[in-house]
Image (cartoon, rainbow, N blue to C red):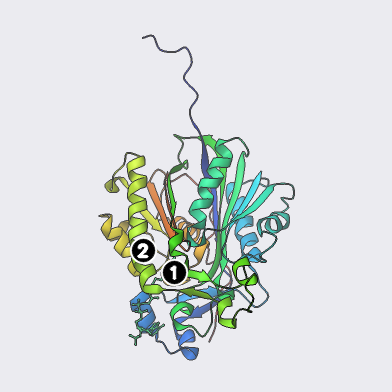
Amino acid sequence: MPAPATAPPRDRAAILCGLAGWLPPRVVTNQKLSQRLDTTDTWIRSRTGISRRHFAEPGQATSDLAAEAGRRALRSAGVDTVDAVVVATTTPDRSCPATAPLVADRLGLTGAAAFDISAVCTGFVYGLATAAGLIAARVAERVLLIGADTYSTIVDPDDRTNAIIFGDGAGAVVLRAGHADEPGAVGHFDLGSDGAGEELIMVAAGGSRQRSASAPAAAQDHYFSMRGKEVFRHAVTRMTASARTTLTLADSKADDIDHLVPHQANLRILRAVAEDLGLPPQRLVTNVESVGNTGAASIPLALADAAAKHTIHAGERVLLTAFGGGLTWGSCLLTWPALTRIDHPHDTGGTQEP
Ligand code: COA
């Protein structure tokens, strides 16, 4: 059969073209937590791999962190306009309205479509798929996606199981329209959920379920709760299965992956996922040691950290995988693009509490 006169149009895809992270300056070490809680630095490091985390200042909200990360991501991409701003978060400034329009306004992006994604720690991967969909459907040419959380505002500071795990932070990417065979093209994806696991990770009060009840909520119900042991098992199983599904969809094998970037939940979880996938430890990207679990911010913060340290290079295959409350999970495969500028997320003039 004769070759067609013109090549068929290549598939439109979303291309990662900007990346940044931002951490609030206040650093809280394990030693600092152990002054208040019945715990030790040794216990926390051995069970979670976490040494320190960053906390927002009193009065600082998720939009403040998100706007900083967003501003840096726009600078990294070398652009000052986008068609949509998507904020993945479990800790919105308010339950109504969404945080994204406020962030867009703060970034001088008034007029852009703006909405939040609520998929807990899987929010960033869900957000990537949503942004990719907006671009594929020609609703947007360029999208700013931010994962931002201030868990310090919903975790009980006296709850030693959860207070040691979570930190605050924001990470952001800019996606532009391009072609599926370009470096930086996001996808394949796998996304999933199991609402039967709702009670494993939740904030019981503040929503319509509690507000429609005749009795007022107990103070404790306004705090984040988690059944740690069960969550641990689900996190390993779901992230491993989702990563495998994504590899299968992309007709790839674990061996083709240069870097696995999981949601930074707990170092033991991350190592178990890498091991189950048959990946050597040096292909596992982690920054949980210095930031803790930052929810929807964790994957872009880990990417920004690795890219700024030149651990990830253009042309390498990167597999993202996440698990969170809902239950939700998701994975995404991409080839790393050549990014010209990435600020290290720790360059925030950090201060450590005595
Ligand atoms: N310091 C000291 N002891 C602690 C402690 C702390 N910060 N937190 C819990 N303990 C104690 C418990 O009270 C328990 O004591 P007991 O045996 O006397 O009852 C003991 O340590 C074991 O508790 P357990 O909850 O079984 O510990 P664990 O090994 O499961 O570790 C987590 C707890 C929370 C670190 C672990 O379950 C975990 O990481 N889960 C996943 C969390 C996560 O990543 N979530 C995010 C997913 S999106």
Q: Quadrant of ligand 1?
A: bottom left
Q: Position of residue 285 (x, y in %)?
A: 38, 59
Q: CA distance from mark 2 to mark 1?
A: 10 Å
Q: Position of residue 173 (x, y in %)?
A: 55, 51
Q: Is residue 309 visible?
A: no
Q: Left or right of 187: which side holds 90?
A: right
Amino acid type of the residue tagged 2 in the rendering: His
- The quarter of the displayed image where residue 151 is located: bottom right
Name the mark nearer the viewer: 2 or 1: 1
Residue 175 to residue 206: above or below: above
User: 122 left or right of 85?
Assistant: left
The residue tagged 2 is: 234
Can you identify the residue that label 1 sits on?
A: 200
- Secondary structure at badge 1 equals helix
Query: Pointer 2 and pointer 1: residues touching (CB < 8 Å)?
Result: yes
Q: Residue drawn 47% across and 43% down?
A: 184
- Give the secondary structure at mark 2: helix
Nearer-the-camera pick, 327 or 11: 327
